[in-house]
Amino acid sequence: MTTVALIPARGGSKGIPRKNLVALAGRPLLVHSIEHARASAAIDRVFVSTDDDEIADVALSAGAEVVRRPAALAGDTASTESAVGHALTSWRAEGLEPTRIVLLQCTSPFRSPGQLDAALAQFDREQCDSMLSVVPFHGFVWQAGPAGARPCTYDPAARPRRQDIRDTVLETGSFYVFRTEIFERSGARLGGRIGAFEVPPCDAIDIDEPADLERARAEALRRGLGADIDLASFEWLVLDVDGTLTDGAMYYGNGGDELKRFDTRDGAGIAAFRRAGGRVALVTGESSPAVLRRAEKLQVDHVVLGCQDKAAALVDLCRRFRVAPQRVLAMGDDLGDLPLVDKVGLFVAPADAQPVVRASADWITQARGGYGAVREVTDRLVRARATQRRAA
């Protein structure tokens, strides 16, 4: 028996741009599923089906093989089954005849250790033809239509307690297992004798919208994932001002002077990071005297006011101070900060940043901009530097 894992990962995505490559716990989303499949003793080979060059490169570097999918099978309306059928044709052209396929959704990044092996063992034990991952479900499901709503899972005349609703499960989409012959006979991933493998609810996060990504990042933090990111390696902290160092509000005095609210905790954190050997830059699209005065008080190392191209400002900073971009941690909250995302070692967003910025960030703080978000970052940077010194 030959078991292969297939991870469909097209380049396009509407809810979250380039979703399959967004960072979660320091690694692209796709890589988590590759690692889960490679860790399974029962899976012989791991493939990623994609139409995208960058995704293909990431997959190869993570240890997967690649099936290059044509663009016609990678659009918004293309089905996962079409990707499976194309992969089977490609494998057979190379002499590979898998007995069964483990289909992994890379937008489901959490699978407990040993989960895939346990599922495959149950698949064999129950002599399944196909299997899906599920979580227990105790809800009351209705179907709404032109003729009104009708119940699907219970009788309203004998309404049960939630705890009495048993043997009802919800499909998670995390993974499916099926025999090749069943797929070819039906054209579907599920058929024949279907098994259900129960996973913990915390493993059932499916990332489709920015809010899902935030939940996933919170779960990753809870699990301690991404702890291998070397925060001590960051030499520079590049900060946006409005919405990051401030709350983003605009205040005006009686004379028309522009006022800004800064948090003293953020200032103390910046000072601590500089004392620990770090350097700090403020890069903002505003040309505010208040920002310049705050920068002078904090003795920051570099200030760029009226910046309309933050990527160019980063290049200039790295050249001027001879620092590699990978050793820069940038923090921002709005669309003008997005050009920094793929050009620095780590990009951080405050808790109340714009949704597309939060979705693109490597790390989202618990605090809001102007209310300790920067301090949350500097505290971790300072601790990482202190730990590094003690270990030296």
Image (cartoon, helix red, strand yellow):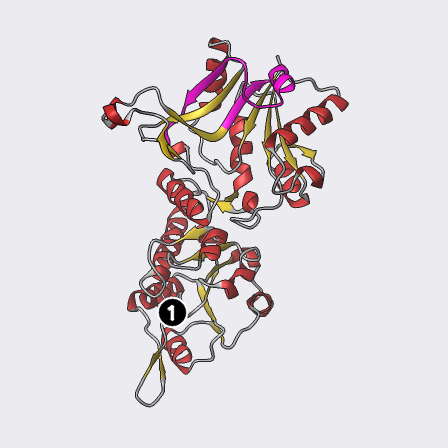
Q: To which quarter of the image does residue 62 belong? A: top right
Quarter holding residue 28: top right
The N terminus, quarter of image: top right
The residue that mark 1 highlights is 248
> Residue 347 or 96: which is nearer the viewer?
96
Lateral position of residue 218 relative to residue 287, left or right: left
On screen, residue 189 above or below 211: above
Whether residue 159 is visible here, answered yes or no, is no
* Residue 259: x %, y % from top left: 34, 80
Q: Residue at x 38, y 69 (%)?
A: 248
Which SS class for mark 1? loop
- Residue 317: percent from left, percent from top: 56, 68
Q: Position of residue 36 (x, y in %)?
A: 51, 29
| Region in magenta | 175-201
What's the residue at 39%, 44% (across, down)? 215
Q: Along the line of sight, which residue is nearer the eye, 244 or 108?
A: 108
**Relative to the observer, which residue lies in front, 114 or 184?**
184
Q: Residue at x 70, y 41 (%)?
A: 71
Q: Residue furthest front?
A: 147
Residue visible at 50% across and 19% down?
Answer: 131
Magenta run includes residue 190: yes
Q: Is residue 279 magenta?
A: no
Displayed quadrant of residue 258: bottom left
Image position of 62 with respect to 157: above or below: below
For residue 385, side relative to residue 26 (left or right): left
Q: Is residue 217 left or right of residue 92?
A: left
In the picture provided, is 320 more to the left or to the right than 241? Answer: right
